[in-house]
Image (spheres, grey):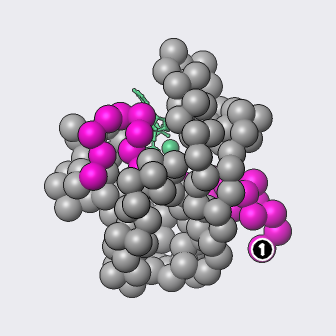
Amino acid sequence: MERTYIMLKPDSVKRRLVGRIISRIEDKGLNITAMKMFKLDEKILKEHYSHIADQPFFPEIVKFMTSGPVIGMIVEGPSAVQQMRNIIGATRCLDADAGSIRGDFAFTNGENLIHGSDTVENAEIEIKRFFGKI
Ligand code: IDP
Ligand code: MG
């Protein structure tokens, strides 16, 4: 079964949207098979976000992503990676379709509530990064 790494960002927790976001994942028919709440540090963010680490907005992302706890999850199901990307919506809030998590709840490009792996290969790398061997 395909699996993906999902992470509810600090704004999901602060805005008390965790329950509603998890409901959307469950409503879709996907299974949450692991979940934990923890805090990120700059070192792991530089790994996880290596593709944007040289962007001018990266220091703000670090500040945001370390501003409170996140909730990491493994989500499983057929085509879990793409199903979750569809539920999450586009990165930029103005591009995210209504009905997607970001389309319905996010109003900035940085604070966009939720991370989902973009490929099956990256999902396995991210699961290993945040959950170890599981
Ligand atoms: P994704 O989360 O949709 O996969 P990525 O391109 O992987 O998008 O970027 C990772 C995260 O970096 C985004 O979710 C967002 O929080 C932040 N980010 C990306 N592009 C911008 C931008 O142009 N301005 C501010 N933050 C951004
Ligand atoms: Mg990404």
Task: Check disc 1 and give the amino acid type.
Answer: Ile
Left or right: 134 as drawn, with respect to 95: right
Q: Quadrant of residue 35?
A: bottom right
Q: Which residue is mark 1?
A: 134
* Depth order, front residue of 82/100: 100
- Give the crowd class for mark 1: few <14, some 14-19, many >=20 residues within 10 Å: few
Left or right: 54 as drawn, with respect to 27: right
Q: What span is colored magenta in the figure?
A: 105-134
**Residue at horizontal 39%, vertical 44%?**
112
Question: Residue 71: horizontal and vertical position, in percent?
Answer: 58, 61
Let me know if residue 133 is in the magenta part: yes
Instruction: Assign a secondary structure to mark 1.
Output: loop
Question: Residue 3: horizontal and vertical position, in percent?
Answer: 58, 71
Q: Is residue 21 above or below residue 110?
A: below
Left or right: 27 as drawn, with respect to 58: left
Residue 84: in sight, yes or no?
no
Q: Quadrant of residue 2?
A: bottom right
Question: Residue 65: horizontal and vertical position, in percent?
Answer: 57, 40
Indicate which quadrant contains ligand 1. top left
* Depth order, front residue of 46/121: 46
Question: Residue 23: horizontal and vertical position, in percent?
Answer: 37, 76
